[in-house]
Amino acid sequence: MIQATRGNLRPYLKSINAILIIAMTAILSTGLVANASIVPKADCVAAEAAFVLIPSQVPGARHAAVKSKGRRKKAKKKKKVAAIVSAESDGYNSSSSAGAGDQVVYNPVGTENCNKLEEFSPMSSFPASAVSEASTPSKKSRRKRLSLPRTGNLPDVNWRAIPLAHLRNHPNFQPLPPPSMIHHLPTKEHVRYFRQESWQWDYLHRGRCTTSQTAAALGFLEPKAAEFLGIPRSLQRGGGGAWERLREDLMKSDGEDSLSEMERILCEGRVVGAVRLDASVFGKWRPGSKETERLWISAEELQRNRKLQNKNNGRTLGNDKARSFPFMAKYNLKIKQDELNERKISLQRQRANSMSSPMRARMQWGNAQEATSILTALNYFCSMDERTTIHEIGMCGAGFDDADQDLLNGLKIGASPDALICHGNGTVEVLEVKNHCPFVWNNRHPKQKGKRTNKHKHHDNRQGEDQSSNQPQGRQYMIRDFDLERKIPPMYIPQLMMEMLCVGDSVDLDNLTNSSLTNSNPTCTSAVMVRQTATKGAILLRLYRDESWITEMKYWLGKFKSKYVNTSIIPPDNFFWNKVGSDGDRYQKFLQHTKELSESVEQVGFIPHGKIQRVMLENGGSGEIPLFLDSVGDDIE
């Protein structure tokens, strides 16, 4: 037995590593270690071994965490800010509370506690997660902190969205000119230069089978065909809407679809005094340079500025240095706190005047986030080849109106891709983006009188949720983490194939020697779909053009036109599915082919959540922009 005092320990400590001596001296100098009791030599070695561990691993150590003023403010701020979604929103990262600034009181371990000491000896093996309760929050507290920001009553559908008007100024994006500058249409296909938000674009849909009606006209959204293809019931609908749209073509006056009449109706630039563009530059128009410089700074310019700054500071930057900025251009504008406050007030007014629903939020989210998803594709493809550009496009396919299309039986078709990808090697691809809305009904009611109620199912929960949302603690919506799949849903196959068909021969129509779209091989042989989420990143998928499928599509659209539209007969339920004989077998094979195409797509790439370019908060903290605006404007100390 030896007396473990400072005097007889000092010679023994000379044989221990210098780091342990410093640690031992620091602990002893604080006066927080009492005189150790007399223990056997072997037990004393175990006790000394315990000093090697960090405080959070020492049994019997109680943590009196000293929180600084700044830490208290930070904790208070976290409690008040709700719905914070950042690049780390999918997981929970917390710093250890047993870090610097904590005071650890160590109670010497006697003989009766030596067995506990040996379990934490450095010679023993224990999992890396074996840390004190003070250093890692419990699962209960972790769930609590995660659930608060993932529910709310005011979903922000414009969350971190970059508007299309600003994307038009991007150095790698080729926009369309304002409709007021178009005064002449050399061919019908030149109507593709009218922007998709223009009234001209809306007018061109009259009596035309566009992508919004193609799936319905093919019978894909009928109950039996939809069940076979795996289309959700919420997206199923009959062919009546397509039937009404296509019947509008029968109501047009003679000559209304002639080129001269279309030019007279659509071209605002025919007005005297209007700023006009020559048809040869419709697809080459650029906004003002000052506006572009205000919104974007290219990565090359950022690199030049960095080199110049390093040169002025006496530092050199190697020529082989990779582009430091992760995107093709820096977006200069940032959202201000005042803008979030105004957005919250606007949502509160809308909520008071009309009943909100996830379906409405889904539609608004898709429209608001479209330009941001296009920017995701731009950053991906342009980083592979800087010659690549993304082109804005209107409605394509009007050039087929006068073409000989026997299968279509005189049906006029059209398609409006979200953009075109023009690669540096001359390849053209259709770009279609789908933004998966994160807002769904919150089926978990708040705790009331110590009990959690969950009586209602998802489809009939609206009334209960609306009632609970009027209460202070009620939250109507919750965030859904959408898991991306390496497939394109079958209901989108007609849309992509129609877009590839209607894009036709070339993007630059003015270089064509013949205005007909059927006299040369198509340059657009593939389509890229971007499926983007709010919390799980984005996936890029490629679907290749299938001529046999397109032929079948024309056949069944022509059938719809001749059997129902021309005869004014409203299509019944499952109008193509119930066919018997050769047509019935042909339609079943067509559906099977569609299903196979949806699962045979090529995965181009995956973009993690943190690498998607979105608008940031004015102070630089992108993670401080909430998906829900309920807590925006609250006083934060």
Image (cartoon, rainbow, N blue to C red):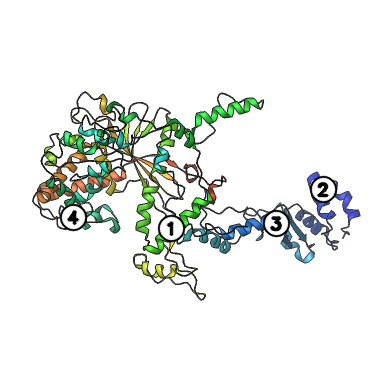
Q: CA distance from mark 2 to mark 1?
A: 63 Å
Where in the figure is residue 374, as x and y percent of width and height? Answer: 39, 40
Residue type highlighted by circle 2: Ile
Pick whichever of labels 2 and 4 is earlier in the sequence.
Answer: 2
Q: Secondary structure at mark 4?
A: helix
Label 2: which residue? 21
Residue 630 in the image: above or below residue 377: below
The front one of 76 and 608 is 76
Which numbered mark, 2 or 1, is in the foreground of this view?
1
The front one of 143 and 1 is 143
Query: Residue at horizontal 17%, vertical 46%?
Result: 207
Label 4: which residue? 240
Query: Residue at horizontal 41%, vertical 36%?
Result: 378
Label 3: which residue? 69
- Horizontal side of 565 relative to 110 (left or right) equals left
Where in the figure is residue 296, as x and y percent of width and height? Answer: 48, 35
Where in the figure is residue 37, as x and y percent of width and height? Answer: 85, 63
Q: CA distance from mark 1 to mark 4?
A: 34 Å
Where in the figure is residue 292, as x and y percent of width and height? Answer: 45, 34
Pick whichever of labels 1 and 4 is earlier in the sequence.
Answer: 4
Which numbered mark, 1 or 4, is in the foreground of this view?
1
Which numbered mark, 2 or 4, is in the foreground of this view?
4
- Horizontal side of 47 relative to 395 (left or right) equals right
Give the residue at the far bottom of this rendering.
Answer: 449
Residue type highlighted by circle 1: Leu
Tag 2–tag 4 contact (CB < 8 Å): no
Locate residue 154: give its quadrant. Answer: bottom left
Q: CA distance from mark 2 to mark 4?
A: 85 Å
Label 1: which residue? 347
